[in-house]
Amino acid sequence: MSLPLPLLLLSLLSILPQSLSLPKGTLINCGAPVKSLIDGREWLPDTGFVSVGTPRNLTAPVLVPVLSTVRSFPNNPHRKYCYTVQVYRNARYMVRTTYYYYGGPDDTPPVFDLIVDGTLWAVVNTTEDFAKGESTYYEGVFLAQGKTMSVCLGSNNYTESDPFISALEFVILEDSLYNSTDFKSYGLGLVARHGFGYTGPVIRYPDDKFDRFWVPFEGYNPVNVSNTNVSVSDLWNLPPLKVFQSELTTGQAETIELNWPPGSVRESNYYIALYFALGMLGSRVFNISINGVPYYENLDVTPEGLVVYARKWPLSGVTRITLTPSAGSSGGALINAGEVFDVLPLGGTTLTRDVIALESVKQRIQNPPSDWNGDPCLPRQYSWTGITCSSGPRPRVVTLNLTSMGLSGSLSPSFANMTALSNIWLGKNNFSGPIPDLSSLKRLEKLHLEDNHFSGDIPSSLGNIDSLHELFLQNNNLTGQVPTGLTGKSGLDLRTSGNSLSAPPPS
Ligand SMILES: *[C@@H]1O[C@H](CO)[C@@H](O)[C@H](O)[C@H]1NC(C)=O
Ligand SMILES: *[C@@H]1O[C@H](CO)[C@@H](O)[C@H](O)[C@H]1NC(C)=O
Ligand SMILES: *[C@@H]1O[C@H](CO)[C@@H](O)[C@H](O)[C@H]1NC(C)=O
Ligand SMILES: *[C@@H]1O[C@H](CO)[C@@H](O)[C@H](O)[C@H]1NC(C)=O
Ligand SMILES: *[C@@H]1O[C@H](CO)[C@@H](O)[C@H](O)[C@H]1NC(C)=O
Ligand SMILES: *[C@@H]1O[C@H](CO)[C@@H](O)[C@H](O)[C@H]1NC(C)=O
Ligand SMILES: *[C@@H]1O[C@H](CO)[C@@H](O)[C@H](O)[C@H]1NC(C)=O
Ligand SMILES: *[C@@H]1O[C@H](CO)[C@@H](O)[C@H](O)[C@H]1NC(C)=O
Ligand SMILES: *[C@@H]1O[C@H](CO)[C@@H](O)[C@H](O)[C@H]1NC(C)=O
Ligand SMILES: *[C@@H]1O[C@H](CO)[C@@H](O)[C@H](O)[C@H]1NC(C)=O
Ligand SMILES: *[C@@H]1O[C@H](CO)[C@@H](O)[C@H](O)[C@H]1NC(C)=O
C-alpha cells in the first residue's frame, strides 16, 4: 500500500481534541537521532530497539518528518536484522512498517523480506510507489506471544542493495478487533482498507482511534457518492464513523461491480470485512458475491450499520465484488468501507527454553554476531549465524558453530539448558574463563573449544556424557589434571595439548 506524500501531510494538520486518548503503543522513527513530538504523538529514535545498521538522511528534503531518516542494513544473503520491541504479552498489535527510499530518483530501491518473530510476513517492494514519489507501508495484526516482538528485514534472492526502513509502529488493538481470527496460529497482513465513495484525505487518527488508514477508493467509475447522516457506533472492528458518512451507491436495481482489492493478490486465504450503514430513508437489500461465489444473501442494511466478514476466503489474482439489489429493495446497492487481510499461518517460534539460554549466552559474548536478534531458528532460511535447529514449529538448537569468528567473552552456564545440542564448536576464538558444567547435554557429541583462552579445570562431569566422542581442548590455558573419566572413556577423541595441565598421577 502506498500513501501520496502531500496527502499524508494534509491529514495530519488537524488539531487533536484533548479528550481523545492517544493510540497506545510504540512509535519508532528509524534512523532518527532524537525523539520528536509529531501531532501530539511521541516518536522515539530507534537506537534503543536495534543494534545494527546505519542511520541515513534522505538526500532530498521531504515534508513528512518521520520519512526524513531511514536505517539501512547490510545486504547479507539470508541474514536478518531485527528491531526488538517490548510488548504486553497476549495483547493484539497493529504493526506498521513504512518505507520511503533514501536514494536518488534514478536509483531502484531494494526488494527484501519482512519478518515478524518467526514468520515471513511479506516481500517489501517499494519500486512502483517510489517511482510515483509515494511512501509504502506494510501493516499487519499480530498477537504478542511473549514480552517482546521482533520485526526484521532480511535479504532474499532478489535483494540487490541494503534493506532499509523509515518507520515502525506498534499500536495495541482492542481484543474485539478481528477476533474471528485465531491469533495464536495466524497473523493478518493488510492487503487493502478503503472507504468507498469517499474522496477526502486518508481517514486515520483521530477519526480512527487506532490510527488505521482508510484510503479513498478511486477504482469505481462513475462514482455515485451520497453524504449521509448515520448513527453508527461501536460496530465490530470499530471502523471510524467518518467512513459511514459517504458511500458508494447506485439507483434502483443497479448493480455495483468493484475490482477490489485493487490489483492482483497471491493465492491465499483472506479475511474480508465489508461495512455498511443506511443513511437515508427506505431500505437497501442486496446480494453480495465475490468472483461469482455468493458471499452474503439479502443483506438488509440498517442505520446502525453492520459488518459482513469472512474469516478465510480463498482468493487468487483479480477480485470482483458484485452487489446486486433484490426486488424488494427501495434503492440500489451501497457500500461504505472494506478491509482485506492475507491470513498468514504463523511460522512458529524457537523453544522458549533455548531462546532464554541463547540470550544469556549472547550476553556473555562481548561481540556477538550482528544478526543475533529476533527468533534464533525461524524463519528457517534466517536462523542466526552459527546456529542449526531441529525441524517442527517449536525448533530447538542442535548445533552452535562459531568457529573462528573473532569472538571474546566467556561461556554462560546456560549452555546447560540447551539440551538438544549435539555440537558445540567454538574453536579459534578469544573465549576465556572456565568451561561450564555441560553434563545435562545428554546428546552432546562434539565439543570443540580449541585455540581459545579457557582457564581452570577440565570439568570431570564431561565424562558423564555418554554420547561425547570429540573433545578438543588444545591450546587453552587449562590447569589441573585431565579427569580419569575422560582419559579412560572409550571412543573419545580427546585433545588437550598446549595447556598447563599437570601430569597424571603415576598409575
Ligand atoms: C542527518 O542530519 C542531521 C541534521 O541535519 C545531522 O545532525 C546528522 O549528522 C545527519 N546524519 C547523517 C547520517 O548524515
Ligand atoms: C518489484 O516491483 C516492480 C514494479 O512493480 C517490478 O517490476 C519488479 O519485478 C518487482 N521485483 C520483484 C523482485 O518482485
Ligand atoms: C534462493 O536461492 C537459493 C540458492 O541459490 C535457492 O536454494 C532457493 O530456493 C532460492 N529461494 C527462492 C525463494 O527463490
Ligand atoms: C468478538 O467481538 C465482538 C464484539 O465485542 C463480540 O460480540 C464477539 O462475541 C467476539 N467474538 C469472539 C469469537 O470473541
Ligand atoms: C443531517 O442531520 C442534520 C442534523 O440532524 C441535518 O441538519 C442535515 O440536514 C442532515 N443531512 C442529511 C443529508 O440528511
Ligand atoms: C446515483 O444515485 C442516484 C440516487 O440514488 C440514482 O438516481 C442514480 O441513478 C445513480 N447514478 C448512478 C450512475 O449509479
Ligand atoms: C439473492 O440470493 C438469493 C438466494 O440465493 C436468490 O434467491 C435471489 O434470486 C438473489 N437475488 C438476486 C437479485 O440475485
Ligand atoms: C563448524 O564450522 C567450521 C568452520 O566453518 C567447519 O569446518 C565445521 O565443519 C563446522 N562444524 C559443524 C558441525 O558444522
Ligand atoms: C584476541 O584478543 C587479543 C586482545 O585481547 C587480540 O590481540 C587478538 O587479535 C584476538 N584474537 C582473535 C583470534 O580474535
Ligand atoms: C535453566 O532453565 C531453568 C528453567 O527455565 C532456570 O531456572 C535455570 O536458571 C536455567 N539455568 C541456567 C544455568 O541458566
Ligand atoms: C593463563 O592463566 C594464568 C593464571 O590463571 C594467567 O596469569 C595467564 O594470563 C593466562 N594466560 C592466557 C594466555 O590467558
Image: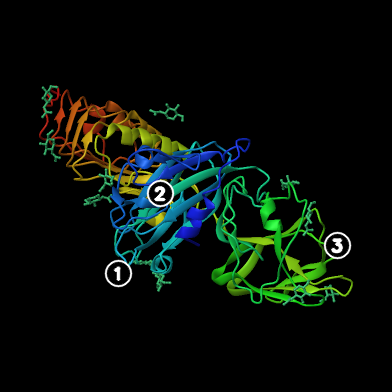
Q: Answer yes or no: is residue 452 visible.
A: yes
If the image is split into quadrants, where does the C terminus sit?
top left
Q: Answer yes or no: is residue 492 visible.
A: no
Q: Which residue is found at the position 18% from the left and 27% from the top? A: 455
In this view, 497 is above or below 256: above
Circle 1: element type:
loop
Instruction: Give the residue pinned by disc 1.
Output: 106
Q: Which residue is found at the position 38% from the left and 61% from the top? A: 112
In this view, 431 is above or below 297: above
Nearer the observer, 244 or 394:
244
Q: CA distance from mark 2 to mark 3?
A: 45 Å
Which amino acid type is marked by label 2?
A: Pro
> Are there few (<14), some (14-19), or many (20+) residues within 10 Å of tag 1?
few
Q: Please report contact status of discs 1 and 2: CB closer than 8 Å, yes or no.
A: no
Which amino acid type is marked by label 3?
A: Leu
Circle 2: element type:
helix
Instruction: Give the residue pinned by disc 2.
Output: 65
The dot on residue 281 is 3
Q: CA distance from mark 1 to mark 2?
A: 23 Å
Name the image quarter holding residue 336: bottom right
> Are there few (<14), some (14-19), or many (20+) residues within 10 Å of tag 2?
few
Q: Which residue is found at the position 56% from the left and 57% from the top? A: 202
Say left or right for 395 vs 261. left
Nearer the observer, 169 or 411:
169
Disc 2 or 3, which lies upstream in sequence? Answer: 2
Which amino acid type is marked by label 1?
A: Asp
